[in-house]
Each structure stands twice: as C-alpha cells, then as structure tokens.
Amino acid sequence: MERSSTVWISRVGRVLLLALFAVNVYRAATQSITRDEAVTFDRWVRPPLRDVLPQPYDPNNHVLNTLLIKRTVGLFRLSEFSFRLPSLLGGALYLWAVYRLSRRLLGTGPLFLAGVALLSLHPLILDYLSAARGYGMALAFWMWALELTLEGRNLNLAGVCLGLSPAANLAFLWPAAALGIAFVAARRASMAVVERFAIPAVVTGFILLVIPLSHAQPANLTDGAAGRSLYLVPPATLAALALVRKVNWKPVSMGALGIAALLAGYYLSQFRIGFYGQWPQDAGARSLVGILRRDAAGRPVEIGASRELEPILSFYQARYRLANWKPLRRQPVTGEFDYYVLTANDSGLAVERRLEVLYRDSGLLLARKSRD
Amino acid sequence: MVLPILFGAAFTVAISIAMGSLLLRRLRVTLHRLEAVLFAFVGGSACLSLATFLLCLVHQATGPVFLSGGLAVILWAAWDARGKPRRMPLPSMPPVWAGLFSLILTAFFLAYFFNALAPEVSADGSGYHLGNVARYWRHHGFVWDYHSLRSYFSQGAEMLFLVAFSFGGHSAAALVHFAFLTALPLLMVCYGRRFAFPRAAGFAAVLAYTCPVAGLAGSSAYNDLAVATVLFAVFYSLQVWDETNDSKLLILVGLLSGFAYALKYTAFLALPFAISCVYRRIRDRRLLLLPLSAVLMIAPWTIRNWIWVGNPFAPFMNRWFPNPYVHPGVEQSLGDLGRYEGIHHFWEVPLQLTLHGSLIPGMVGPVFLLAPLALLALRSPHGRRLLAAALVFAIPAYFNTAARFLLPAIPFLSLAMGIALANSWGILPALAMFEALVCWPPVLALYCDPVSWRIRHIPVRAALRLEPESQFLREHIPDYWLREPIEREVAPAEKIFSFTTRPEAYIEQPIMVSYESTLGNLANEILLTPIYYPPLVRRRFRFEAQNTRGIRVVEQASAEAYWSIAEMRLLSQGREVQGSPSWHFTAWPNRWEAYLAFDGSAVTRWSSWQPMSPGSRLQVDFGREERIDEVVLEGPVDAAQVTVEISTGGRWMPLGRGPEVTRMEPSTDLRMAATRELKGRGIRYLLINDSDSTGADMKQNTSQWGITRLAEANGTVLYRVD
C-alpha cells in the first residue's frame, strides 16, 4: 500500500514537472519579447563582441546567458523561441534538479510532492524558467551544485555548476560563494574538496567572467542582488520542508502540507500563461508589431517609440528583417514620425497630435499620423 | 633582404649552441637530449657574449671575424660530437598535452616570429639597445669617448645582438632575442618532464609564452626574455645538481648566474640565490666553484666600467663611486621608476597587470589573477622552491614597475600554479586554452586599454620586406622621418642634443640626451637657463681684506633642491680679481664641474646634483696668496644659506658676517649665450620636440637663439646652431 502511494506521488511529481516544462516551451515560443529581454538583445546579443567587451560592465548583462543566446540565434535564426532557448534549457535543468533534490531531502511521500509544487510553481521562478534573463539558468546551476555536493559523487561537476551559476547571472555570486564556502567548511577544508570542488568552481566562473568583468566597478558585484532574491526561495523551501520531515510529527506534517497546498494554490492563481508577471505591459508587443508590419508594408517608415520600447522594436525589426523601417533614432518621441509606439505614460501624445490609433492595450499604444 | 636577417640570427644561435655543446662536453654533465640542446644554447650564449666582449675590447668585432670564428667553432663542435653516443630522451609528455602545447606554441611562435622579423621599432630596441650595438658595429668595438648612462649597463645580450647585426642588421638582433623567448617554454617543459610533472609544465609553458608582455619584449631587441630564460636555466641546473650531486654542474650554474648579471644588472640576484641554494646542501670548497665561474662573466663588465667611468656599477652607486660622467641626482630619477603613476589603490595593480595595461606598461595576462592559487603548491618541495625563486626574481619589479620586470618571476609562478592546479581535473587545459585565446593579439585588443604596451599586429608583409622597410619605420617611429635630413645636414661625428631619447639605432650621429650624461645635463641646463633659471639672486659677502691662498663657500641648509651657483666672483677694493692658470677649482660634491661657477657665463653653473645638504662646498685654491675683501655669489632663487671660509695657514677659517642679498636685474637675452656655450662644447645641432620646455620658444624666437631650422617632422625640429 505504502509502496503504491509512493509510486503514485512520484508519478504526479514527474507529470507536474513535465507539464510545467511543456508550459515553458509554449510560453517561450508564443509570448511577446519583454523590454528587459529586448535590452539584452539590443546591447549585448546583436553587437559583435568587439563592441561589447570594451564597454563598462553592466550588471544586466548576464554573461553566460548572453553567450548562449548569441549561439542559439546564430544557429536557428532570431525568434522569440531561439532567443529563449538557453533559458528554456536552464529551466529544464532546474525542474530536474527540483525533482532530485526533493527526492533526496524530502523522501517519497507527500512532502516530496509539496516540495516539487512549491519549487516549480512559484510564479517568479516559473517566469524565469523561460524568459531570457539568465536568472533561471543561474538558479538551475546553483541547484545542481547543491544536489551534486549532497550526492558527493561528482564534486568536479558540482564545482563547475557552482562556477556557472554566477556566470549565468552575477546576482548569484554571493549565493554561490556561500554554498561553496559552506560545503568546503563542512568538509573541514580538506585538500581533496578544494582541488575537486572549489578550484573547478573558481576557475569556471573566472574563465567566463574575468573579461566581461574587467571593466566592472565594485558596486556591480552587488547590483541586482537585493531586488532579485530569487535564490532564497528554493533553499528556504527545501530547508523548511526538510525540517518538517526531520521532526516527523504528524500534526506538524499535516500543517506544513496544508500551508504548502495553500501556497501552491496561491502560486497557481498568480500564474498567467499569456504574459510574464514581471512585464505585463509588454504582453501585446508581438500583436502590435504584427499590425505595424501589415500597415507599413512595402514603404519606408520612420517610427518614434517611447524610450523603453525602442529595444522591443529593434528586436522585432531584426527578427522580421524589416528593411523598410528606418533605424530608430533614439530621440524624444516628441519628434515627427510616421508611426508612434507609446507606453501608457506617453499615450497622451496620441490625443495631443490627433494620431490615428491602430492598437491599444493596457500597456502599449500604436498610432500613426492621421491621413486626413 | 630577408635571407641575411635569418642567416644573422640563425648563425648566432648556431655558434651559441656549438660553444655550449663544447662546454657541456668539457664539463661532462649528464643531460637528456632536448635539455642538452637548450642548455647548450643558453650556456653557449654566455660564452659567445664573453668572446664578443673581448673582440670589442680589441676592436675586432667585424663581420669577417665573426664569420670565420663562428664557422670554426661550429666545425669544432661537430667534430667533437662525432662518434659520441646519443643522449637519452626525456620521459614523454601525455599525447593530449603534447598536441595542445604544440598547437598553441606554433600559433604564437608564428605571431612572434613575424614581429621579430619585421623592422625593429620598439622604443628601447631602436633606442639604446641597438643604438649601442650599431655604434660598436661602426667602430668594431667599444666607443670610449661616447658617454651615456645607457651605454654603461652590462650588455651581455647586446654582445650577441652584435654578431647577428653584423650580418642581418636590426631584425637579426631581435630574432636572437626571440630565440631566447622560444627556448624558455621548451626549457620549462623539459623541467616538468624530468621531474615528473609534465602537465603542469605544459600549462606553465603556455602561460609564459602567451604572456603579452613576454611576446612583445621577446620579439624586440630587448633583453628581458634572455634574462628570464637564463634565470630559469640557473634554477633548472640547480635542481639537476640537487638530483645528481654532480659538482661540475656548479660551474655551469656559476657561468649562467654570471651571465644573468651580464645580461641585466637586475639579474644579479641569480648568484646569491644559487649560492644560498647550494650552501644549504654543501659547505665545502666545491661551493667556491659557483662564484669563481660567475666572476668570469661579471668581471669584464665591472672592470670595463671601473676603468672607463670610474664606477664599476655605473650608472648606479654614483655616490659611492663619484665620477665625472653620471650625476647622482640623475641616478635618483632612475629610482623613481618604482612608483605607480596614476594608481590610487593597491588592487588596481593586479588589474592593470592582467587586464588593462594602461597605467603600467605591459600586461602578463588574465590567468595570473589566479596566481594566489599557486600557494597550494607549497605542499610540494618543487612548489616551494619555485615559489621561493618567483619571490626572489620578482624583487626588481619593486624598483621598476614596468610589467617586463616581472618576467623573470613568470616561469616560476606559472609552474607553481601548474603544480597547484594539477590535481583538479580539466583545469590545466581549460586555463591554458583560455589564456592562449585571450592573449592572442586581436582578442587582447578587445578588452585591454587601447594604449597598453602589446603586440598589435602580425606584420607579415613588413617582415618579408614586401612592404618597404623605410615605410614601416616611418609609420612606427615618428623620428625616423628626420633620418634623411640628419644624414644630409649633419656630419657623422657631429653631436646632436635632444631632451628625449631618439631611435639611435637608425641615426649614426651621436645623440646627447639631456638626462643620459653629464654633458647632456649641462646642455639641458644651459638651454633652460635663459627661460626658466636666469641668475636672479646676488649674495654679497663683505669682510676685512685678507691675504689668502684659497677661499670657499659652504652650504649650511638642507633642501630637496640642488644647490647651484651660476657665478662666484672674488673682489678686492671693488674690482673683480682676475683668475689665473694657477687657480684650481674644486667642490664637494661634483668637483668636476666646479669651474662652471668661475667661467664668466651666466648660462652655465655649478650644481651639487644632489639634494642641498650642510657641508657642501665650492672652493678655489689660488696656488699663491691673493688679497680678497668681497665674495659675490650669483644664482637662481633657492633656499641656500651659505658661509664663506678662507684658507689661513693651511686651515679654513669662517668669516663672520652673513651675506647681503639683493635681487639682480634680469639679464639681457641669454638665448644666444646659451647656444654659444653649446657650440663651444661641440654641440651644433638640436633635435627639439614642440612639447619640450624650449620647443615653443625656439620656434618663436629662432633668431634670438642664433639657430636655423633645418627640418621638421611630426612635431620635432632639427636646428643648427649658427
């Protein structure tokens, strides 16, 4: 009886993770590019390395993510999916790590299922498992480093994963350092652990980061860390549930499972398959561009865009190879243009100039000069 | 055009290997096959350098002598090797490492080779290194009447360059240095194969060879890579001695230690290092083999300088060995090279050295940021020795911050890093490939500072002389544009004054650089005086008339500035006492220039050339009694506090009252007087940059200076003193 329930729980966990991966694939392929992703494209993916490397380091450049995106868009042509493919693979690694860590730390019972649900349904995490921002990938490598250090069989690979984590997103530098130091300290700084784990971690991170960070300022090492405390979710969840398992007292277990169920329900209620929770205002960008393409087809046009939206238009201009769009001029949107792509904040311009609105949603507005 | 260059370099290397083979056979040291070739090259270089020194002494450093002598040595070595059993090979390297090492080394070898083969354009290479060589070549030996502090350095590498230069010119010399650069990683790999850490050695060899500063210095006519290679050979041979306990090896160690000094003063550390290593194991007379064989290589340079300049260690230690050719104050400016200009925090130093290269000339490569990991090598005996050597041979970098002064420590540090990381799977090849990638010149340009000192191109066309040499030189050496006007306007022996160094290797005429000799210092002061330091203060000492055989002024104050006196006038009853041939002028310090305070010229002056200190004095001995009642000192505004003393009955007696200080009326235009003084000292031509202190004034007031503009290019003007 016990055995069959364990198998059933395990299957549910696997199905949940596979379903989430399928959701991630769907979102990666269908959702509009967001402004943060578009900035990554505009500033670090599109320019050649010779233009990127001498620039002062920007903490929004998540080095490994950028390099992998360069590779995938080079291989498969630019599209939302190819752009998000590295993140998507990072997401798959994360979900796999969630499964293994939950099995290792939470056993095969309901706590396992609670762990899988809480770690995979968290809306912020779920967004980053397909959005091309490097956070999900960094979290995946961090989780694998944790898993492999707990397993203890392949410390070399654990070290490499630990080094890849900050390379994928520098906000993970301190969590990676914390995990590395904790593990080395737990093994009493034995030389074998230093050689098989710490050195590969340091060298992996070094190889990927030393040149991009060569023009960094000390503040860059902490930028982004405060606002992106994503890395706290998995260890905190795992630690709490593992503690519950260790206490092994039914009322506590039942209470924890109840809280987990509530949290999972809350997470699900927050989830929107049609857009990323961080960037709801960009959800209609793809539709907007579709209308703009059709309306401006076959004639050269000049587009004025709110500053935040310029990278998105650059992305789609490159994605659809729109040669009839004149280069975006990076000037205040108050100039004279054929089309205007505006944020909600700038949408008053459409009224002021009596522009003809072609598309409008809660975050975006497309308008053209009136043909009267 | 290319063949003589290649022949010159190859012939020099071949003579070195031949001499070294003979040396090794005489010493009967046990070395493996590749080791023997490399040690023959390094040891033979020492012998060839010494032989060339001796030829320079007797002015027989000519092409035919090098050719006949070199061929004789090569034939002798070939004859000597006839019928001898082949040496044993070293344990082999893992095939993957051998492949990786060969691939990286071949790529960088080609990049460096074409840079070395291209016309020599490096600052010091085309400046004094080959400037000295070209001078010796023209005179078939040392030139004793040419004085520049850069010609007093030991010139072991230049002696080798001279052989190559005789056949192939400047690029042949650079290729000889390149041979040392290429020998270094091979020696490192041999070391690792011999002592059972071939992977660590392969990694270290890649680090050392791809190091950007090594690449540039090693493909130019510098001496830093020769120093690094010889120092590593010293260390290597010490380890072999430690293993085999063969006392004859100590002779080789001693010769190489001495040769290190002959290559560059900063490498003098090799001898104390070697002695301390040997002293730990043996404390009998075998230890003497080391210094005795080292002295063979060191003595020629110290004795030369002692006889020639009066200072065996010129251009250093001039306070200990005062001489008329180098002012101690100038030596102090050499010491200033130990300051990191523009660096505000200590952590900027490693970043500059590894990633930026803007505030420190040269870079060693990003992987050296991981150098602290080398401390893990302290666990092994080899690691400890390597780190000790790295520490000792990095000492000169404290006194000169240029990255190339770290080069002697790089092989040791790289090997220690290799040993430290060897047990981490995949780390050594990953780091080696990464370093090779990011140090490859076009990749390096992506992240280092644009002004950093590095190889910028691989000039294949210029190297093969498909691009005219003069065109390449004009593009890279701005002063080269003036070579033709100088050759046309200036006779070969005429001196040219310059405030800054020039590419002497391409200019036959002797250049007097403002800070390189006492004559340069004097010319510098003479030219600056009309604009910046005209005598403005007159100190008048009045006292009761005295019959005296001598009189002197003594400094009582201390200050950082030098004490200087433009004129010292002696008066009696209001009339200046005229000097006579019996008058003898002296001073302390800088006695050789005391006469400048008595020459009646407002643009020359005696200077202490040391910070002002109590007890400094300027003195005149009359040789007979003179009646004096007044002493007048004229000079610039300064902090001097001077007293006057007279010689009475063989004793110096101070005179009571202090001076009456007055401000002098500005002199009439001294510009013409200045150029007249230069002409009187045999300097009839000036090379002046627009940015020099007198550059703008000379352009505006050419006629007042009494000079004629002959040519101008790239902000530098050639003037003739009329």
Image (cartoon, coloured by chain):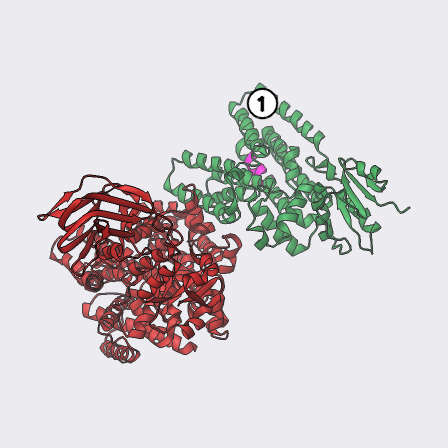
What's the chain of the residue with tag 1? A
Give percent across and percent down for residue B462: 48, 71
Residue displayed at 42% across by 65% down: B707
Snapshot quadrant of residue A137:
top right
Position of residue B297 relative to residue B141, above or below, is: above
Amino acid type assigned to the residue bearing label 1 in the image = Ser
Query: Which residue in the structure is indicated by mark 1?
Result: A253
| Residue A159 inside the magenta-drawn segment | no
Q: Residue furthest top?
A: A251
Position of residue A214 relative to residue A278, above or below, is: below
Give percent across and percent down for residue A283: 74, 39
Q: Residue furthest right?
A: A372
The magenta span reads: A95-102
Q: Is residue A83 left or right of residue A347?
A: left
- Asked if one can make out residue B14 in the rendered structure from this viewpoint, the answer is no
Position of residue A263 relative to residue B268, above or below, is: above
Residue displayed at 79% across by 37% down: A347
Task: Say which colour chain B has.
Answer: red
Query: Could you tell me how many numbered marks the image carries?
Result: 1
Residue displayed at 29% across by 79% down: B67
Prevailing secondary structure class for the magenta stretch in the rendered image: helix
Position of the N terminus of chain B, as image quadrant, is: bottom left
Q: Residue furthest front?
A: B573
Snapshot quadrant of residue A186:
top left
- Asked if one can make out residue A258 in the rendered structure from this viewpoint, the answer is yes
Give percent across and percent down for residue B246: 18, 61
Chain coloured green: A
Residue A83 vs residue B594, the one in the foreground: B594
Answer few, some or many: residues within 10 Å of disc 1's Cα (few below 14, many 20 plus, some between 14 and 19). some
Snapshot quadrant of residue B327:
bottom left
